[in-house]
Amino acid sequence: MSEKITREEVRHVATLARLELMEAEESRMTRHLNQVLAYMEKLNELDTSDVPATTHAIELKNVFRPDEVIPSLDRAKALNNAPQSDGASFVVPKVI
Amino acid sequence: MDLCGLTIHQLRELLTQKAVSAAEVTSAYLQRIQSIDSKLHSYLEVFAKEALKQARDFDEGKRDFNLSPIAGIPIAVKDVLCMRGVRTTCGSRILENYVPPYDGTVIEALRNAGAVFVGKTNLDEFAMGSSTENSAYCQTRNPWDLDRVPGGSSGGSAAAVAANLCAGAIGTDTGGSIRQPASFCGVVGLKPTYGRVSRFGLVAFASSLDQIGPITKDVKDAALLLQILAGYDRRDSTSVQSPVPPYGERLEESIKGLRLGIPREYFVEGMDPEVAEAVEKSIRICGELGAEIIEVSLPHTEYGVAAYYIIAPAEASSNLARYDGVKYGLRTPDCRDLLTMYRTSRSRGFGPEVKRRIMLGTYVLSAGYYDAYYRKASQVRTLIRKDFLEAFQRCDALLTPVSPIPAFKVGEKSEDPLQMYLSDAFTLPASLAGVPGISVPCGFTSQGLPIGLQILGPHFREDLILRIAHQFQQATPECRRTPPLNEDP
């Protein structure tokens, strides 16, 4: 079976996904993804060149609502679950 | 009297007659949970004190519940639904200490209807799995055989209902997560039409597929719970405005003259022969009840697994980007920069299956692969959806097995993700098409494992599949059994 995704690609995808994989995890992930992606080949049995894509099973038009101000979560509650906050905002490690 | 063995509507009767108090009912369930759940691990958290208080409030008439059918009755909730003030973990380490500051819409609706919340049930991490083996906290066991899985991802809810550890439960279904555990545990599970129930306050897995629905001891209970869950909600723009019919009203109506389709693609090589036999017998019973049975074809069924396991992980990879250690959830302390904090927090917080799906989803959406995978799968989704629309031109509803196999052993498939994915082959297509489906017990294997019949209906025809399921259940009392679990002395 030809490889669909190499170990280097797995490492790259992990970076895109903001994940960090340990050595052993990386080789297991490569094996599992190859297995699953090889199975996905099945879809190529179908000619879909004239088929539109479905992103939503129920046909809905754009849903609009009036632009009204309604009460929302207050700040203290919104910050309550933060790993770190200063009472006014979320605190994160230095960005710049 | 064995209060825990009763259905919601039976308990309702007793409460109305004042033959029993809600506090007695809740105490009975709490006691049973205490003596049995150490074997099953269906609950992640039990709200003993709060539940008793809610029950007493009901008994003392502190609030008028307007004849709500579930007032004072103990309900369990899958731990992926936000409930104000109590932990909502999604079975994940990354949300171990997350306490939502609000109720999801269905929780609010149940609360307003007077439900007694007895606890939060176990699940596969972020509802990703078919066995509840992916929970970061514990392994729920199947009440019919403790060596086997309860199915998943709503395995905790299904096991709790089957073992009489609650009167009814709420689950969620993205690709079969209500229907499959219901069938593995021998109870009723309903996945509504996409958009029928608001997803506000449901922690998102795959937003174009996720639906909330009931898991219950009988079909009548499923109808009355759905009545409370269903409806438009301005907080979920994908919830649908169409009116909610009275689901309980026509349950007793005969299915005589209905045309039921049997899709030949659901009866394939490799299916467990006892499952096939039980489902074929169920089809004959529906025929004897007066339904006309016809063969139909859903030609793209075999592509469901591949399409689903591209679309759902793609949506998941996007939805789960929010777990970054900033607003809530786990954060690795003392990171030198933001990117390191994101990566280490996520890597420690997520389990292997969730990482696998995030990776798969990120890959199929990434530059160069989007057309080959995500776009292709979305086109195949169109074909699968069309299969259903065409089949429903010829028949009123479809009868199929829920799963090709009965409950499997703990550990049997956990090292082989593809085998696990393939076991969902019969529930995924309906999810991709957005049509409603119900799982109803239809027999047992020679080893005593439950088998489920799946009834699928056209969009927004929950009333119809509930009626067929109820009529089937009335005709097959031998299929409704209670697992032989003994309470510890």
Image (cartoon, coloured by chain):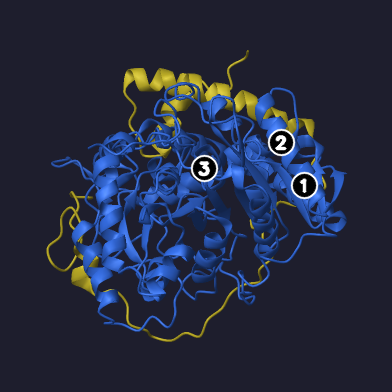
Q: What is the number of the mark on residue B481?
A: 3
Q: Which of marks 3 and 1 is in front?
A: 3
Judge left or right: residue B145 versus residue A2: left
Residue B439: tell me if it is visible. yes
User: Residue B300 location, x and y as percent?
Assistant: 77, 39
Q: In this view, does A62 lie above or below B10?
A: below
Ranked by sequence position, the earlier of labels 3 and 1 is: 1
Ranked by sequence position, the earlier of labels 1 and 2 is: 2
The amino acid beneath tag 2 is Tyr
Determine the chain carrying the residue at label 3: B
Does the residue at mark 1 contact the one at mark 2 (Cβ under 8 Å)? yes
Residue B113: tell me if it is visible. no
Q: Distance between the residues labelled 3 and 1?
A: 39 Å
Residue at x 62% of width, y 23% of height: A38
Residue at x 73% of width, y 66% of height: B253
Q: Nearer the viewer, mark 2 or mark 3?
A: 3
Q: Mark 2 points at which residue?
A: B303
User: Residue A2 location, x and y as percent?
Assistant: 62, 14
Q: Which chain is blue?
A: B
Q: The yellow chain is which one?
A: A
Determine the chain carrying the residue at label 1: B
